[in-house]
Amino acid sequence: MQARRKTTQLLAAAVLIVSAFALPAATSHANAPASGRVRALFFGDSLMHGTGSHPGRPIMARVVARQLGWNITVDAVGGTGYTTGGARGKPYLERLSRKGVLSTPYDVVLIEGGTNDKAADPGTMRERTTETVRYVRSRLPTAKIVLMGAYNPPGRRYDARRVTIDAVIRAVAIEQSLPYFSPISGHWTKGQSGRFLCSDGLHPSTYGYGVMGAHLVRALRAAHVA
């Protein structure tokens, strides 16, 4: 029975991946949604971008769009976070403040992050996360803001500092009365093998993002966002 359950889980993940690739490419510019469809902005780092998948696509967002019927815009830059811009980007608040990023009247704004903030002081992290949430709320007062916390890969690249950062994001979500979930607190990588990761040992593979997407759909439904 255990073998059958595992086979069923693998098939479900495979179906989600195939479904994701059947969708049109997500862009950073929203199109007019079909009547009645939820308009959502999925904002984040390389995980939301789909770094490590082949070809590189925002698979998690595509799985959600497919399963929930949402019209999703993805704005994702690798290496960035609430406190860091990485080598090529800007921290979240600066990115969100750019002209046009929040010009669409989104129904949902999901902010995924924290993974690249592992070196941040918890106090600074809390301050920047709070500022980011307040800015989005000021621009889109009717939108439902969702915080998706940090990610730790299974295996040797696990970093305990991300657990601390994830707890900070959760604290801000509670303080701001926002839905919150994360790959860390939700144990999204539990029991996963090497197949889950791409060659860099950090980012998920195409299969891994399919698994993450399935967890994301369940988390959104459990948080009563979907």
Image (cartoon, rainbow, N blue to C red):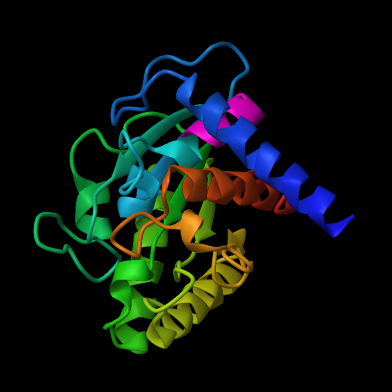
Main SS type for the magenta part? helix
Q: Position of residue 111 (x, y in %)?
A: 43, 53
The residue lying furthest to the right in this view is: 1
Q: How many marks?
A: 0
Q: Position of residue 57 (x, y in %)?
A: 35, 35
Which residue occupies the foreground of this view, 52 or 176? Answer: 52
Q: Is residue 110 left or right of residue 36?
A: left
Which residue occupies the foreground of this view, 125 or 149? Answer: 149
Which residue occupies the foreground of this view, 189 or 68? Answer: 189
Q: Residue at x 54, y 27 (%)?
A: 18
The image quadrant of residue 157 is bottom left
Q: Where is the N terminus found, in terms of image quarters?
A: bottom right
Q: Is residue 105 left or right of residue 200?
A: right
- Is residue 64 on the magenta stretch? yes
Q: Is residue 217 left or right of residue 50?
A: right
Give the vertical position of 42 relative to 198 (above or below).
above
Give the vertical position of 187 relative to 168 (above or below).
above
Q: Residue at x 55, y 73 (%)?
A: 170
| Residue range corresponding to the magenta coloring | 62-69
Q: Position of residue 132 (x, y in %)?
A: 35, 61
Q: Position of residue 33 (x, y in %)?
A: 49, 16
Q: Confirm whether residue 223 shows in the render.
A: yes
Q: Residue at x 37, y 17 (%)?
A: 31
